[in-house]
Structures are given as C-alpha cells and as structure tokens.
Image (cartoon, coloured by chain):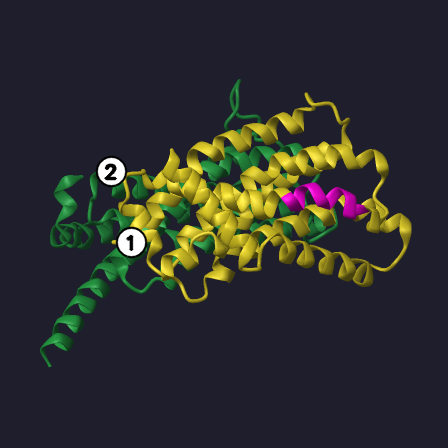
Chain colours: A green, B yellow
Amino acid sequence: MQKFANPTRFLKFANTALPYVWSITILLFAVGLYGALVTSPADYQQGETVRIMFVHVPAAWLAMMIYSVMALASGVAIIFRHPLADVAAKTAAPIGAVFCFLALATGSLWGKPMWGAWWVWDARLTSMFVLMLLYLGYIAIWQAIEEPNRAGMVARIVALVGFINIPIIKFSVEWWNSLHQPASVLKMGGPSIDRSILWPLLVMGLAYTFLFLALHLVSMRSEISARKLRTLLIARGNQS
Amino acid sequence: MNALFSLLRRDLLLAARQGGGVGTVLGFFLTVLVLLPIGIGPDQATLQRLAPGMLWITLLLAVLLSADRIFQQDFEDGSLEVMAMSAQPLELVVLTKALAHWLTTSLPLAIAAPFLGVLLNLKTEVIWPLLLSMVLGAISLSLLASIGASLTVNLKRGGLLISILVLPLYVPILVFGISACSGDANIVNPSLLILSAIALASLVLAPLASAAALRAYLK
C-alpha cells in the first residue's frame, strides 16, 4: 500500500493494469449477459421481467460496496495520511452514486409490472434512496470547498459519519415498513435461488466489480493529473 | 469545567439578547403550522392523522435552519479560534455549543410542539408520547446539526448543503419518533429506548466529528 504513496508509481501501475482490467470486464459481461439473457429460464410468476434482476441486484451490491470503499479510503486518509486515499475516496463517490441510481431505476422499471407502481415507500427502496442522498452530500462537499487538501479533510468526516449511520438508517427503515423480498443469496443454509439463475447473477456481480475497478482507476488517474495541473497553474500564476 | 460553564452561559446570553433565540424559532414553528392546514385543507380528520408527522418534520426543519448559528458567528469573528487554542479540548467546546443550541432551540420546540399540536387537532392521548419522543430526539437533533454546522462553517452557501448532509442522518430519529407516538406512552416503549440509545451514541460521536471538521477549517 505504502508503495503507491508516490503518485507517479501509482500512475505507472494503473497504466499497465488498465488494459487487463478492461478485458476481464468485457469477458465477464459477455459471459454474464449470455447467462442472464439466454440460458437462464424465465420465471413462472414474473415471466421475462425477472431478467431485470441481473442488472439490478449487482448494481445495488456495488452501490453499498463502493460506499464502504469510500469510508475505508477516508479512514486510511485519516490514520495513515496516505496521499492517494482522498483521491480514491473522491473518485469512487460519483461512480457509486451512478450504481445507486441504476439500482433505483431498474428496480422501479421492475416494480411497475410487478407491484403496479413505479415507486413504493418500502424499506429497501427508502434506504437505497437515503444512500444516494449520502453520496450526493459527499460529492457536494467536494464541490463546495475549492482547496483540495481542505476539501479532503472535511469530506473524510462526511464519509465516515455517513458510514456509521448506514446500518442505523437501514435498521430503522426496516422497522418502519418492508415489502421487498428478503435476502436470498447471502443467508444461512445456502442461497435459496436456483443454480441456473444464481451463476449468471454472480458473474454479473463480478463483472460490475471489475467495471468499477476499471472506472475507478481511470478516474483516479485523471484526478491526479487534474491536481498536477492545478499545482502547475498556481506556480505559474505566482511567477507572473 | 468553569470555562465550559461560562461558555455555555455566554452562548445562552447571546441567544437571548441577540434575538434569533427561542422566540424566533417558535415564530417559525407557528408560521409553518399555519401554512400546513392551508396546504392540506382544513379537514379535521386528515389533520389529526397527519399531525404527529407534520410536527416532527417541522421540528427537524426548525432545528436545521438554526444550525448555522452554532459555529458560524464565532468562526467569523475569530472567537472560535481562541476557543480552539484554549486549554479545553475542542471536542468539549463543541459539545458545550451543541448543548447551548439544544437548550435554546430544539428543547423548547420539543416541549412546545405537542401542545401546539392542538391547532392540528392532535389526539390528546398522543401528546404525552410525542412530548417524550421529541425531548429525547431533540438531543440527537442538535448534536447532528452541530456536525453539519461544523462541516459547512466557512462555506458561502452552507445552508442548503447542511440540509443535504444532515437530513439523511435524521431518518432514524424521525422513524422512531413517529413510531413512539403510535405505541403506548410507557417509558420502556422500545422506540423511546432506541431514541435514547441514538442520543447517547451521538453524544459521544458527534463532538468528535464536529471538532475534526472545525480543525480542518481552523488550520
């Protein structure tokens, strides 16, 4: 980890790793989408709409995972003062927000034929919605503070406060109202969904994870360049 | 300890003498209470059903709108810097200021709101549980507002940003505050217990977060 404290070394690593990460992403998407759209059977109750699940569920997983990545990076930034940790947290946020939006949008497309409404105020939907608000707040604080070092210091706290609150929010909205189906992949006694549906779902989950990895690397790379540019411009401004 | 007491006294005096104290917040609360029935319609049964929720949301908004008062003035005239350099840990200073906000804003509102609920035809048996849940919730509301206030202390358009940052954190308090009103007014009502737990947790964690945010700006 400490090795990448040097941005140049990190950039070198990102440049070599990116082609591989992109190839794995494309491969996984090809396999996953084939499984999701062709080989997996239509549901006896839901018909073909069940296939929305293959883009919906991994997006929701990723939205939660990326917030954890953000909080972890913020913690690393506070504890170890790793210079790239803030960059990692900052660039993860918009990607996470998009995955969160994707989960909400596909869920609502599925909800219309199944529940008869685009949106219902169910616990999971509400907590996902709140998660998106947390993402937006985090992005907004980066945009509100001009000086990147100070913005980083403040944004770390926003990310960590949000992270502590996510379980409480989730628990409270579940207490409030729940209509969404309970967890069916990660639970005691093994997954309760059929193998023909489970494997494309897991492959899609992996594909999404690699997509995030690739986008995150690209985004971190451009953030580092933007900061370099900023320093250069300030230096030139001081000269003239 | 003495320094903290005098800080508390100073903040309370400032709130009382500068205007913008209890009176203004109550005025805001009353104004919203007038607007609500106009927006929803004067039907007594509807108002009765919506009353606890509307009172809670008005409380959240009132606390939020007054949140920037916690640190902004002291930050602008430099007294916060003096406090940060004093022998007291910044965390305790922050806690004291949040306490002052609680005493001048959220606690008076929490006590007044259930009685003002009469205007919305609030059921009389709900008044007591609503009062208990609001008083317990008010502690966490002020503490969480202090986090938002410290995060945006030096920003020009901090007011809107505070809402985006803090309102999502208010969700659990709102949920349990409302559910306390539907149950019995017993002190061991689970919702009230959870509200107390949230209050205790934010009593410990909020000053740490606010102080860390203020340090970022005071550098």
Q: Are marks 1 and 2 on the same chain?
A: no
Quadrant of residue B188 within the rendered picture:
top right
The amino acid type of the residue labelled 1 equals: Leu
Q: Residue at x 42, y 67 (%)?
A: B156
- Image side of residue B147 versus residue B38, left or right: left
The amino acid type of the residue labelled 2 equals: Ile
Q: Residue at x 65, y 35 (%)?
A: B176
Q: Secondary structure at mark 1?
A: helix
Q: Toward the viewer: A13 or A175?
A: A175
- Residue A10 magenta-highlighted: no
- Image side of residue A48 versus residue A10, left or right: right
Q: Which quarter of the rendering shows the N terminus of chain B?
A: top left
Residue B13 drawn at (x, y percent)? 51, 50
Q: Are marks 1 and 2 in contact (CB under 8 Å)?
A: no
Residue lying at the far right of the rendered structure: B44
Q: Which residue is mark 1?
A: B218
Q: Which residue is mark 2?
A: A79
Provide the residue span drawn in magenta. B108-117
Q: Secondary structure at mark 2?
A: helix
Chain under disc 2? A
Residue lying at the far top of the rendered structure: A189
Q: From where the camera sits, is residue B94 visible? A: yes
Q: Residue at x 75, y 50 (%)?
A: A116
Q: From where the camera sits, is residue A202 visible? A: no
